[in-house]
Image (cartoon, grey):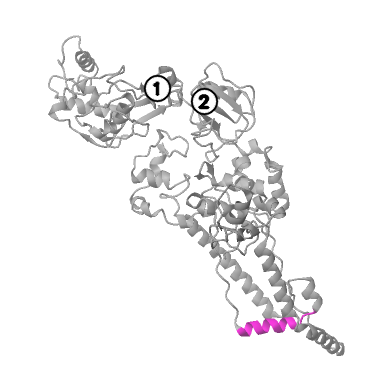
Amino acid sequence: LRAIVQSPSSFTWLDDMMPAKSCRSDHGTRPDHRCHSFAKPSDSEACKFDMYRFGLRGLKAGSGSPGSVRFGASRYLQSQRPSVVSSKASNSQVAEALRERLAKKDVRFILGSKDTNHCGTSFCESSCEAMLQGTNRLQRGLNYMGHLENALPGYQPQYGIYQGPHWHLASFKSYPFTTWALTLDSQKYRATDRVVVDEGANVGPGYAWPFHPAQECMAKCESFGSCKSFSYNAWDGSCYLKDKCVGSSTPIVPVSAPNARFQTYYKDCTCNDVLGVIAEGHSCGSRIDWLVKNAGQSRESAETSVGKQFSDQCGACFDETATTTTVGSTGRRRRRRPRRTTTTTTTTTTTTTTTSTLQIRSCRRRCRTTTRQGSPHPECVGYCAKKSCSWTKKWSCPWAPRGTSGHAGDDGGDGFSCCCKHRTAASQQCGGISDSAKTCDDVRDVVANGHSCGSRIDWIVSQTGKDRKSAELSVAREFPAQCGACEPSAPSPPQSPAKGRRRRRRRSISTTTTVRLTSRRRRRRPRRAPTTTTTTTTTTTTTTTTSSTSSTLPVRSRRRRHRRRTTTRHGSPHPECVHYCAKKSCSWTKKWSCPWAPRGTSGHAGDDGGDGFSCCCKHRTAASQQCGGISDSAKTCD
């Protein structure tokens, strides 16, 4: 049996510890109100706050006058639980027995976010006993949730808040009521906090009027074979069937979105359900078949690779437990076979090098795994050393599917902080991943100013034509607090070669033919010439040819490197300034200088919102830079 209590006028308190005055403000109650301070009332405001129906005192056998509430409750308890309520039992014994029974019951509460009218002027209990619980219905309900946690150690009250005043229809249409009262099949369907960004295409007609419970929408979705999810509005009972496969990691709309009242109900999809879904021009099934046929991967590893790369479209194929394997002895990238050599010494050297390479790769994989997991957040080291996040199976985090008992609330403790704030997925360890070990994939779903880091990166790639690394770098620098993990760490500077090595390299260049130097960058070793008389002539010719070019080769290399650096250094201007810089220039900054430059002949320029100031003063950071500055893809560490 499940009992659902909807915004009562007063509550039955379990002990004599009432909310402090700081928890009973006359105005300004919000849904995030919490009370953690309780004390016994003073004599001036004591009233009969602990007498039933406001408390548990006065319920032993024979209490109350005939016809009163206490008399009826005492008679009922005496008939149902004679061992608990007897003439020999004291009030404290009766109260303790009732507290133990309440902790074992499935009791849930529903409150209205705007049910904040003062009880002194509206239709709710305004007696002295009731006013000690709070000044309005919402405040009393939230104070009672804190009281249950305080009076029943280890007890987690279950409650939901709907958007609206004290109105029975709004309560009946709310998501908590339709979920709890209509027995949502949580084994098959799950619900997101808000509707997903990409809902997919409609399946069948929409169901907007009259009010449709969520259970009815589930039955309608089951009647369509192509229905994989549906959007549901618990406020008006409207639902729209969709063909989109949705998961717990699918991005959802922000709170400020016009359709934020909707939620997406979804059931688990299999890989076969998304084989025909198009992901960037090709279906998930065709991509999997291509990897199996051309890359030599097994079917399972190909499905995992496609599901991970295109999580929004083919995510149902991703299996975290699967490992990427290939058919045969060759890997995904074929390694060239070493050339055959006639000497045994060279063969031994090649084998040793290959073995060392494999050992290095194995070490790198282990190092990456260790760094990837990393240590938990510094604030959670002590908590995670003693406890774990196994309690989230019962009380799930807000970003996870609903647990067996509901979603956990932020109580300000270490448990919620280490298991729900610092973690972004159930597969992560207690305390999450330390900031130094996070990668761009870890912050892909983190919301930065209304949009996730991943959606911002995808938008830059699709709209501006940048490559993915440049897009990740731009987003990381614009939102360092949320998406900073997408900025790659700076590579270590290469070590300068020794003088002897440099001389050997120049000597080897001088013995190479001119044709190979100009046609290909990669330098091959000269073939060994047979020991004949003709060889002497050939070698002499080669040396003569290259000796005439040996003096110019270093100069050509320096010029080529200089041109490459210059081209990369300047690059194209910022995409917003291409049209402006094609027609105009930044010569006007000599008269009206940018704010970061020395004062011009007429002063400093102000930001008028035009392209001139944006391209010459915002995207440039030095007077020596070109109009429009340097594009993000061409920027260097300098």
Check disc 1 and report the residue beneath it. Answer: 165
Which residue is nearer to you in this view: 509 or 187? 509
Q: Residue furthest front?
A: 602
Residue in the image at 51% along x and 58% along y: 369
- Quadrant of the image for the N terminus? top left
Decide: few, some or many residues near mark 1? Use Cα within 10 Å; few <14, some 14-19, many ≥20: some
For the stretch drawn in magenta, the main secondary structure is helix
Residue in the image at 38% along x and 45% along y: 417
For badge 2, the amino acid type reads Asn
Which residue is nearer to you in this view: 211 or 261? 261
Q: Residue furthest top?
A: 67
Magenta stretch: residue 511 in it?
yes
Check disc 2 and report the residue beneath it. Answer: 233
Q: Quadrant of residue 314?
A: top right
Residue in the image at 55% along x and 32% along y: 267
- Disc 1 is placed on an element classified as loop
Decide: few, some or many residues near mark 2? Use Cα within 10 Å; few <14, some 14-19, many ≥20: many
Q: Is residue 8 visible?
A: yes
For badge 1, the amino acid type reads Pro
| Stretch in magenta | 499-513
